[in-house]
């Protein structure tokens, strides 16, 4: 099942921030896992072949910041099939930053706990268009206890949604709950910057330093950006990853990326969309932020790709996001979009264009061979067998 050979690759961008380009022109997939990256000597007997015609292969994008609810529907913008649309923008994995858009969302401890478990379990059983959605990010409310976090973790919940957009606003309470959550293996996110919706607060470096999350969400704004010196303090005084998102300040996305690169800490940069949101549903959001990080932040495009793939997977302990043997074979064939001044996908990112997604593969299965959302690729790319 799900054996595949990808040949004639021009560039392999691995998603590994430490080694972002791989040698070779062939990737072999067996049983849905990457078997080799290189010369394809082990490709014998595999019928399904993608000939990329010199295009680029990158890991499937991992959106670190989504707000799903249940199924492939978002009440925030009353849209169906938004997750399928994101696959057409190259997204194969999504992480929830909370499910605040549930109509009538409960705000008592029993209710938020039940919602986190339900959302987690529901998406564990459902992959819209093949996309791996890790949902069930509990939003903190007064009254949650240490035992509640243990119960949620035992039920599979791995995420604490953005702290600051729900009832717990006080840093001491937030820090206490963050410790309980991290002690049972959950990853904790803190909202930063200006308010996103009425009722969420303005959160800066002091709050992040006090709470010590795993990730400072949307440091370029969600939607309103922090001052850059706050981002520098977060990098200096905590171990948190810093996130840049589509639903934020475009200039600040470049400024944060450049700051992180200057400090030699690109392993701490993660990319998300922060959507669906007030700014809408953004199927090409991940590709566009990679482009901003590269074109505006001056980050090499292959490292910007890693911030949208391997860095996110590393933070969450997921076996995706890097093109290396043993990983789940979630990958994209991408190219310069027709008409671009760039010669390939990485060149397109570097000049601020949005590349073409020609093919998306999840677990070794071709999920799409023509994106309905990106422009078409320059190169002829074929799938046979
Ligand atoms: Zn937020």
Image: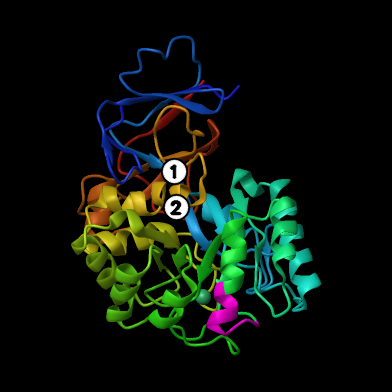
Please tell me in which quadrant of the rendered image residue 278 appears: bottom right
Badge number at residue 312: 2
Return the x and y of residue 308 as percentages of the image width and height: 40, 53
Element type at mark 2: helix
Q: Is residue 374 above or below residue 230?
A: above
Q: Is mark 1 within 8 Å of ligand 1?
A: no
Please tell me in which quadrant of the rendered image residue 367 appears: top right
Please tell me in which quadrant of the rendered image residue 142 appears: bottom right
Q: Is residue 66 above or below residue 211?
A: above
What span is colored magenta in the figure?
Answer: 167-175
Extreme residue in the bottom direction: 198
Way the structure is coloured: rainbow
Tell me: 243 left or right of 156.
left
Is there CB contact under 8 Å for labels 2 and 1? yes
C-alpha gap between disc 2 and disc 1: 7 Å
Return the x and y of residue 380 as percentages of the image width and height: 34, 35
Q: From the viewer's side, name the closer residue of 241 and 69.
A: 241
Q: From the viewer's side, name the closer residue of 28 and 325.
A: 325
Q: Is residue 350 magenta?
A: no
Return the x and y of residue 337 as percentages of the image width and height: 32, 50
Within 10 Å of the Cα at label 1, are there few (<14), some (14-19), or many (20+) other Cα atoms? Answer: many
Task: Name the quadrant of the N terminus.
Answer: top right
From the image, tell me which residue sits under label 1: 321
Point 55% across, 71% down: residue: 162
């Amino acid at each position: 099942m799900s054996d595949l050979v990808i040949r004639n690759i021009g560039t392999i961008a691995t998603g590994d921030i430490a080694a972002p380009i791989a040698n070779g022109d062939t990737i072999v997939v067996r049983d849905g896992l990457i078997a080799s990256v290189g010369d394809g000597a082990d490709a014998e007997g595999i019928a399904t072949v993608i000939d990329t015609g010199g295009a680029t292969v990158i890991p499937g994008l991992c959106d670190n910041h989504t707000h799903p609810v249940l199924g492939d529907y978002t009440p925030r913008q009353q849209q169906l099939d938004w997750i399928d649309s994101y696959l057409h923008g190259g997204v194969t994995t999504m992480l929830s930053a909370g499910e605040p858009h549930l109509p009538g969302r409960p705000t008592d401890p029993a209710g938020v706990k039940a919602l986190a478990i339900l959302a987690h379990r529901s998406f564990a059983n459902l992959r819209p268009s093949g996309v791996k959605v890790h949902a069930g990010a509990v939003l903190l409310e007064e009254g949650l206890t240490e035992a509640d976090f243990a119960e949620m973790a035992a039920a599979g919940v791995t995420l604490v949604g953005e702290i600051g957009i729900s009832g717990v606003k006080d840093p001491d309470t937030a820090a206490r709950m963050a410790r309980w959550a991290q002690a049972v293996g959950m990853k904790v996110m803190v909202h930063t910057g200006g308010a996103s919706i009425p009722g969420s607060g303005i959160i800066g470096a002091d709050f992040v330093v006090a709470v010590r999350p795993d990730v400072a969400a949307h440091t370029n704004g969600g939607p309103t950006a922090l001052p850059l010196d706050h981002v520098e303090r977060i990098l200096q005084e905590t171990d948190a990853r810093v996130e840049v998102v589509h639903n934020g300040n475009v200039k600040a996305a470049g400024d944060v990326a450049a700051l992180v690169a200057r400090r030699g800490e690109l392993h701490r940069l993660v990319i998300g969309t922060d959507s669906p949101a007030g700014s809408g549903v953004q199927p090409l959001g991940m590709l566009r932020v990679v482009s901003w990080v590269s074109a505006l932040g001056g980050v090499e495009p292959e490292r910007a790709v890693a911030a949208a793939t391997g860095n996110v997977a590393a933070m969450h302990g997921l076996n995706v996001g890097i093109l290396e043997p043993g990983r789940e074979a979630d990958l994209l064939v991408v190219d310069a979009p027709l008409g671009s001044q760039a010669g390939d996908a990485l060149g397109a990112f570097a000049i601020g264009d949005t590349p073409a997604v020609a093919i998306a593969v999840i677990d070794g299965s071709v999920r799409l061979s023509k994106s309905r959302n990106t422009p078409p690729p320059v190169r002829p790319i074929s799938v046979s067998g």
